[in-house]
Image (cartoon, grey):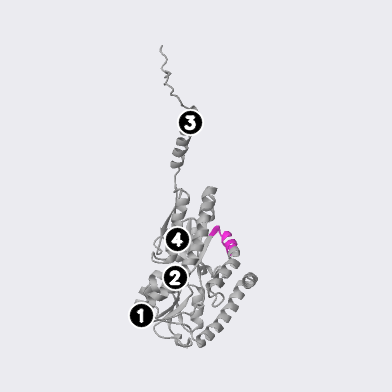
Amino acid sequence: MQNPIQTVHLPVKKGFSLKRVSATLVAATLSFMVSGVQATEWDMPTPYGDSNFHTANIRQFADDVRDATNGELNITVHSSGSLIKHPEIKNSVRRGLVPIGELIMSRLANEDPLFEVDSVPYLASDYDQAWKLWLASKDVLAERLDSQRLKLLFAVPWPPQGIYTQFAIENGEELKGVKMRAYNKSSEQLADLLGAIPTQVEVPDIPTAFGTGRVDAMITSPSTGANTRAWDYLSHFNHAQLWLPKNMVVVNAKAFRSLPESTQKALEDAAAVAEKRGWDASKEETDAKIKIMRDNGIVVSEPSAQLVEHLQKISETMTKEWLERAGSDGQALLDAYRQR
C-alpha cells in the first residue's frame, strides 16, 4: 500500500535561512493571535451635551484609550444623559450596569459630605485654590469610592460658578422669592440662604425650565450659561466665582481588574492626560464663554462689595454646617488643604 504522506523536496536557494522562515511564521502567528483578540467594549454615560468641554475631553479620553490599547478597549461615549440619567450614573457603574461613567462629584453629598467639599462657597474660588483642594482631597475621596467598588480615574472642574438673573444684583436681597435653578446640595442651600426657592434642574432641561417658568434664575458656570443660550431667557450674569465644582470619572472596580495589566495602565495613563487637559480647557473656557455671553447681550458684572459681604456671611454658615456633617474627616481635609 502506498504511503499517503509524501515528502516533497523543495530546492533550496542560496542564502535561504530556516531561522528566517521560522521567525516569519512565528511573527505571522502572533499577528493573527493579536488580531483575533476580541475587543472589550465599554459604554460610558455622561450627563452633558456634545458642545460641552467636559464631553469633548471625555471623547478625547476614549480615543486615547482606544489608540493606546490598539483597539482592545473601546469606550463608546453616550452624551446628554441619553443612556443613563445623571442621578443614576454612579449606582449604575457601582452595580456593573455600565463599566464607566461621568458625574458631578457633589451629587454624592447626601451620602457622604466629603464629596461636597468643592462646592462650599469661597473655600476654593479660583483655579490655584481648586487644584490645592483637589490634591488635599483626592486620596480620601478615592478611598470612599473604593469602599463602594468604584475606582476614581480623574476629575475636572467647571469654571467658577456665578448667578444668572433677569435683573442686576446689588446686595443679594433682590433674590428673595426668586425660583432658582439648583443642581446639588450646596446650590440648594445657597438659594435657601439667599431667600430664593431652589429647584433641581439638569443641564439639558435648563432652557425648558426657563421657558415654562419653573425657574427664573440659576447658579451655574459661564460654560453652562453659554451652552444653554442663557441670553434667550436671562439678561444678567454676576461673575461671583462662588466655587469650582468638579466632574469625576469612575470605573467599576471589578471591570477594571478584569482588564489585562497593560490595558489597566493604558487606561490610567489616558486618565492622567485627560485630567490635565481638562483643567487647562476649563481655564480657557471661562473667558471664552463669558465673551460669547457678552457678544449675545448678557450684561456681565463683578459682585459688588455689598454682595460679596453678604455671600461671605452665607459661606461662613455653610462651611460651619458642612463641618458638622463631615465631622473629623472633614476637618482633617480642610487642615490638609490649608497647609498646602
Tag on residue 285? Answer: 2
Closest to the camera, between mark 4 and mark 3, is 3
- Report the span colored magenta: 141-152
Distance between the Cα atoms at labels 3 and 2? 56 Å
Q: Earlier in the sequence, mark 1 or mark 4?
A: 4
Q: Can you see residue 94?
A: no
Q: Nearer the viewer, residue 39 or 65?
A: 65
Q: Earlier in the sequence, mark 1 or mark 3?
A: 3
Distance between the Cα atoms at labels 4 and 2? 16 Å
Residue 147 at x, y percent in the picture: 58, 60
Residue 78 location, quadrant:
bottom left
Q: Secondary structure at mark 1?
A: loop
Q: Amino acid at mark 2?
A: Glu
Q: Are marks 3 and 2 in contact (CB under 8 Å)?
A: no
Tag on residue 305? Answer: none
Q: Are marks 4 and 2 in contact (CB under 8 Å)?
A: no
Residue 111 location, quadrant:
bottom right
Distance between the Cα atoms at labels 1 and 3? 72 Å
Residue lying furthest front:
14
Residue 312 at x, y percent in the picture: 55, 83
Tag on residue 297? Answer: 1
Distance between the Cα atoms at labels 2 and 1? 18 Å
The residue to which callout 3 is attached is 20
Q: Secondary structure at mark 2?
A: helix
Crowding near pointer 2: few (<14 within 10 Å), some, many (20+)?
some
Closest to the camera, between mark 1 and mark 4, is 1
Residue 287 at x, y percent in the picture: 44, 74
Crowding near pointer 4: few (<14 within 10 Å), some, many (20+)?
many
Residue 162 at x, y percent in the picture: 46, 78
Q: Does residue 153 appear left or right of residue 209 in this picture? A: right
Q: Secondary structure at mark 4?
A: helix
